[in-house]
Amino acid sequence: MPQASQSVLNSHVPSGPIAEKWDRHRFDMKLVNPANKRKYTIIVVGTGLAGGSAAASLGELGYNVLSFCIQDSPRRAHSIAAQGGINAAKNYPNDGDSIWRLFYDTVKGGDYRSREANVYRLAQISNSIIDQCTAQGVPFAREYGGLLANRSFGGAQVSRTFYARGQTGQQLLIGAYSAMMRQVGKGKVKVFSRREMMDLVVADGCARGIITRDLVTGKIERFAADAVVLCTGGYSNVFYLSTNAKTCNVNAAWRCHRRGAYFANPCFTQIHPTCIPASGDYQSKLTLMSESLRNDGRVWVPVQAGDKRVPREIPEDERDYYLERRYPAFGNLVPRDVASRAAKERCDTGYGVGATGLAVYLDFKDAIGRDGEQTIREKYGNLFQMYEKITADNPYRTPMHIYPALHYTMGGLWVDYNLQSTIPGLYVLGEANFSDHGANRLGASALMQGLADGYFVIPYTIGDHLATHPLPKVTEEHPAFKEAEVASRHRLEKIVAVGGGRSVDNIHRELGRIMWEHVGMSRDKAGLTQAIEDVKALREEFWSNVKVIGTGEGFNQNLEHAGRVADFLEFAELLAEDALNREESCGGHFRSEHQSAENEAQRDDDKFCYSAAWEFNGVDQESTLHKEELEFEAVPLATRSYK
Amino acid sequence: MSESLKLTLKVWRQPDADSPGRFQTYQLSDISTHMSFLEMLDVLNEQLIARGEEPVAFDHDCREGICGTCGVMINGQAHGPDRETTTCQLHMRRFKDGETIVIEPWRATAFGVLKDLVVDRTAFDRVITSGGFISVNSGSPPDANALPVPRDDAESAMDAAACIGCGACVAACKNASAMLFVSAKVSHLSLLPQGQPERQERVLNMVAKMDEEGFGSCTNTSECEAACPKTISVTNIARMNREYLKSSLCSR
């Protein structure tokens, strides 16, 4: 069992009524005067929505920003793949939305495992994001009168989602990227692309720099700064098959964790219900079809198990629209965790369709009959086209096959209200932190959080840190840089030196199978214990039998992948430990021992109403558990129901 | 149709930017027609690793056609034979059993080869830095609905904004011109009311930067549009030319 610690994490949530906390806090924080801002250097790692918006905003304020990304251009970070939209409490459709309702929906959607004050702030800021992005020229969908259009999304009964066709993430990211490149032109932001963060440098108790590897030349480099902002996304690729881009990884976060940043709620992983099913063992990733499709598509399986007729031959009364049946109030728009488990339940009991039996139908026949094919094409044209490219099926004629897949990770590095980790001067934004989504994220809320953190939170909170800490000058010659650089170099040399017989990809796939089997949609004590053993054994095999071609000198994608898998193999164990520790079901974390007679998740608020923040004690050492008790004052704890 | 393919690949191998490159031939069998093109390259690389040979370097990331990272010349066509398709979205069902596939990197003066199939596209970032933005700082801009945008304008702006910056337009062009890429950004911003204040200097600065980076002139043959996975139209180039002319005549 993990060691439990009595230490209490200080979330630094300001006092006062929830609606006034952020305003009050903004006044209480110390400012850095404009002339002094140019004396500070801030490192921002990652250029997705959080990193791009943070780098742009900090550059605009006058700080010197060093921005790093592993892609060839900052415009390619995985935020770009978000399809459906971004939430805001504008209430433009006049359907009863408000900041309070967005806040309430997000706390409830997160199954009461998020920090109330953070969520309220997120809802407050949401409206400014839409204004900001519109001013940048993000081409949101509009009505004929020229005003912005909205659509509805899972977990909400109002239409509060703004969108740019099925490419909302791309358009928002291009907005943030453009704002950042404008600062590059002004000399306030320097971009270092094709750089991978290898380590965090902590000097005199504060985060003061990073070690990177130039992915083209292989050169290990040192960069010093006054603060480090980590915006490096989520860790779904620990499951190998996920909707994440291939380079998404946990390295940067894990390296910080090893340097003292606590990792919170790693077991809160989100399975997205509407992905294209896997087709063979060469499968390299899974493709998500936007949740917005559930606005018009109806999910069903045949009433008869094993019914092999083509879908069009199955009459209406022999179809089971199981989401509408089980959850009449929300129907096909139940939150992701609920929809995913319901699909798994149908497939596990033999009602699944397709060649593998691991799929359910998402059918647009009724919507096309009601609104016409043209309307559906305008709303989802690019998604339908993408589906057809991958499967060679035409979804206008025949229902889509869908199945859940790993998508988003709510867990991440623990941060306080200021988004500061347990290492002073290390801030964590966007999906890389754990703060706002609790045990389950609602659709169209990831983009909201990434941009809220980058445009509207970090510009204030980082100033308070810089203004209130003495921060003596630290250069790249500081011994902490040397130590971290040597450690990074040794690690790569050690991987290359193994010279075994098994490829990196092969080991990664096996890790994925272990995690999906035992730590996926449904978890139990025996499976989790098994997974921990299996991961340990696989980690040993990696360090004794991995085969990497070439060396660390120069461009070597095989070595890059190996470095990422090495960290996944350490991280996977913590994920499973956290899942084992949390003896309840909540949101994306479903322990089969804890479910109601109707197979709904059962929380245990008496024992587990806390965020689990883990402290690293060494590989093969048990981590120390620190609990941040969660208090729900504004939204009283209740059983989540979408019936 | 057979479900599995035997293929001959001729792949461009180049150790680094400064060394000469050459084609290397590989044989592959049992390639499922359901595989994506990049999954086929994954299979090749696993086989190379098993033989102790260096795997082929290629850029890729999201593998769902939106990040713009991937892109190679396949039998002389940027992103391969399918219209509106990135390399990662191309599937092997498009190829015949026994076929020979020639795979090369983008070829353009402005896009140097870094290794094998990987090229340096940072010239695009520098073009955006020269003017591909609207100058608003994070803060308190007016309410998003304060400025209505006619739906058709918003839709046209979105058509242009759909560019993923993959560089296929440059690779497909005999002159390695970046006109389609640059004009997509110019159009996106000049079609929106928010983009009006900087409309003139934007197009002048971006075109100047485009020339400085070593991209060629437009050939007017529309190869770029044919290769574009997001069907960015050459009408954007016409629009950029008008914008450029107007701005040159009216510039302060």
Image: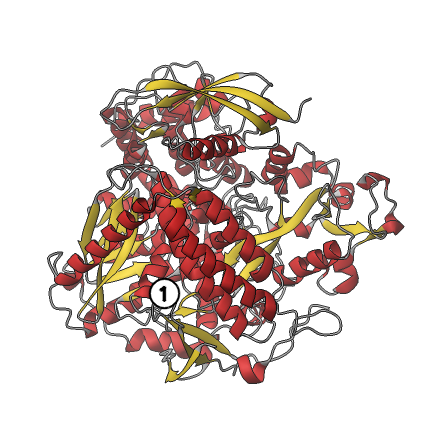
Horizontal arrangement in the rendering, residue B28 relative to residue A186 (left or right): right
In the rendered image, the vertical position of residue A456 relative to residue A151, given as above or below: below
Horizontal arrangement in the rendering, residue A160 relative to residue A355 (left or right): left
Q: Position of residue A58 (x, y in %)?
A: 27, 57
Q: Position of residue A252 (x, y in %)?
A: 34, 56
Q: Position of residue A514 (x, y in %)?
A: 55, 56
**Which residue is tagged 1?**
A619
User: What residue do we see at 61% from left, 58% from top?
Assistant: A159
User: What residue do we see at 32% from left, 48% from top?
Assistant: A495
Sort mark 1 into few (<14), some (14-19) or many (20+) by Cα contacts within 10 Å. few
Assign a secondary structure to mark 1: loop
Q: Position of residue A151 (x, y in %)?
A: 61, 53
Q: Is residue B18 in view?
A: yes
In the rendered image, the vertical position of residue A11 relative to residue A620, given as above or below: below
Asked whether A430 or B184 is in front, the reply is: A430
User: What residue do we see at 26% from left, 71% from top?
Assistant: A424
Horizontal arrangement in the rendering, residue A2 relative to residue A552 (left or right): right
The chain ID associated with circle 1 is: A
